[in-house]
Image: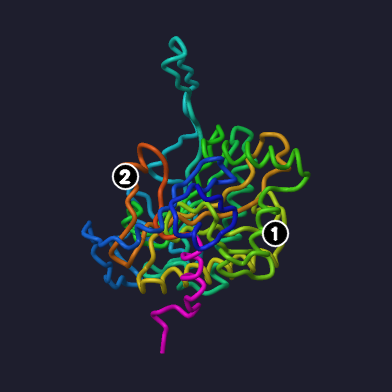
């Protein structure tokens, strides 16, 4: 077997495993499979033009929500407790352990809904930078309030965009789930970041970011305070990470200048996404940040994941089935190719092209 230890063409074109530094897990990269013809499912393109206000929408200003309560006639960002929350603050204490085989425990928490805009027809890339800055400020305020509850140990800020990602309402919105235990993905990222910090005295993502900026192979773009890149271990076709250049643990540590830069990065990234296949690009995205009320976590470095499913066009998506469900994640296009494609995209939204 030929020994290859650099990202040579031979490496890029051959099946190989890449390790996720944050979780310790691996992804199988099979770039030669991009040559195969596609005879599988093709999704229909969403070409529905939505109105600025929809009288039947549970999230539009002044409308009735699913539980019968009324939204205020809000003119900006708006947050409320989810009417059908996955976590409840008054969950009874539950501890089940039968012979170390049947194990369960109660989980309490709070689920919030964040309406990004009163406009029913806009998504993040179509909002003005000032509107994005208000969303970020609201995220920070919600994080602060939820972290003040001593029973909360982790706060997940996220957005599911598009029907293909399970979004039940097209009105631009995201969610925040705050819970009493640290979830599995955060536990894995905490473990690996802590190991690196203990040995090297700096955050894992600071070192990783320094290397990626030097190599420039997977960088999509950067501004003064943030870098957007396709991670070396990306699973989804056009997956990216948005990483703060400064080592901060949570959104609460961002200065006003950094909040403005984060709004800039979000708009530029999501615009590139929409331009890739000239469609309202679906994804699940969320911040990963330090647990709260759980002691010091000097190792934690704020970052945001974007997991979009589209693979070849606006109508062909990546399916996580078979080998992915039973063995390991697998991708066909390389992270380097994905980064190149995203770098090529204009930052002028395709709807606004002259």
3D distance between C-alphas at marks 2 and 1: 35 Å
Residue 91: horizontal and vertical position, in percent? 47, 28
Q: Count of labels shown?
A: 2
How dense is the environment of label 2, judged by Cα within 10 Å: few (below 14), some, or many (20 and up)? Answer: few
Taking the spot 42% from the left edge, 67% from the top edge, the residue there is 123
Query: Which corner quadrant holds the C terminus?
Result: bottom left
Range of residues picked out in magenta: 335-354
Q: Quadrant of residue 352?
A: bottom left
Residue 170: horizontal and vertical position, in percent? 34, 61
Instruction: Identify which residue, 61 or 324, lies in the foreground.
Output: 324
How dense is the environment of label 1, judged by Cα within 10 Å: few (below 14), some, or many (20 and up)? Answer: few
Taking the spot 32% from the left edge, 51% from the top edge, the residue there is 319
Q: Earlier in the sequence, mark 2 or mark 1?
A: 1
Q: Is residue 315 left or right of residue 343?
A: left
Q: Is residue 217 visible?
A: yes
Q: Quadrant of residue 332?
A: bottom left
Find numbered disc 1 in the image and state the secondary structure of the residue it sits on.
helix
Residue 81: horizontal and vertical position, in percent? 46, 46
Can residue 311 be found in the magenta stretch? no
Residue 329: horizontal and vertical position, in percent? 42, 45
SS assignment for the magenta stretch, majority: helix
Please tell me the numbered disc located at residue 210.
Answer: 1
Please tell me the numbered disc located at residue 321.
Answer: 2
Instruction: Identify which residue, 27 or 225, lies in the foreground.
Output: 27
């Amino acid at each position: 077997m030929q020994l290859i230890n650099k990202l040579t063409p031979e490496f890029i074109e051959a099946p190989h495993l890449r390790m996720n530094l944050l979780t310790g897990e691996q992804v199988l990269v099979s770039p030669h499979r991009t040559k195969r013809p596609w005879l599988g499912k093709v999704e229909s393109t969403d070409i529905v033009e939505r109105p600025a206000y929809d009288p039947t929408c549970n999230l539009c200003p002044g409308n009735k929500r699913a539980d019968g309560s009324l939204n205020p006639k809000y003119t900006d960002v708006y947050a409320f407790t989810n009417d059908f929350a996955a976590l409840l603050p008054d969950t009874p204490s539950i501890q089940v352990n039968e012979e170390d085989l049947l194990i369960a425990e109660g989980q309490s928490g709070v689920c919030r809904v964040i309406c990004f805009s009163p406009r029913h027809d806009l998504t993040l890339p179509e909002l003005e930078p000032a509107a994005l800055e208000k969303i970020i400020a609201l995220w920070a305020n919600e994080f602060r309030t939820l972290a003040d509850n001593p029973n909360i140990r982790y706060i997940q800020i996220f957005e599911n965009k598009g029907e293909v990602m399970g979004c039940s309402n097209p009105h631009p919105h995201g969610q925040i789930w705050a819970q009493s235990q640290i979830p599995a993905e955060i536990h894995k990222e905490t473990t690996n970041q802590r190991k690196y910090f203990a040995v090297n005295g700096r955050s894992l993502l600071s070192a990783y970011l320094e290397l990626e900026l030097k190599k420039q192979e997977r960088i999509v773009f950067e501004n003064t305070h943030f870098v957007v890149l396709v991670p070396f271990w990306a699973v989804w076709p056009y997956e990216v990470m948005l990483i703060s250049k400064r080592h901060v643990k949570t959104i609460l540590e961002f200065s006003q200048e950094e909040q403005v830069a984060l709004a800039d990065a979000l708009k530029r990234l999501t615009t590139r996404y929409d331009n890739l296949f000239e469609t309202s690009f679906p994804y699940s995205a969320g911040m990963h940040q330090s647990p709260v009320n759980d002691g010091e976590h000097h190792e934690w470095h704020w970052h945001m994941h974007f997991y979009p499913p589209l693979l070849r066009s606006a109508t062909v998506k990546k399916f996580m089935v078979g080998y992915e469900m039973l063995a390991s994640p697998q991708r066909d296009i390389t992270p380097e190719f994905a980064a190149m494609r995203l770098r090529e995209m204009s930052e002028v939204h395709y709807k606004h092209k002259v």
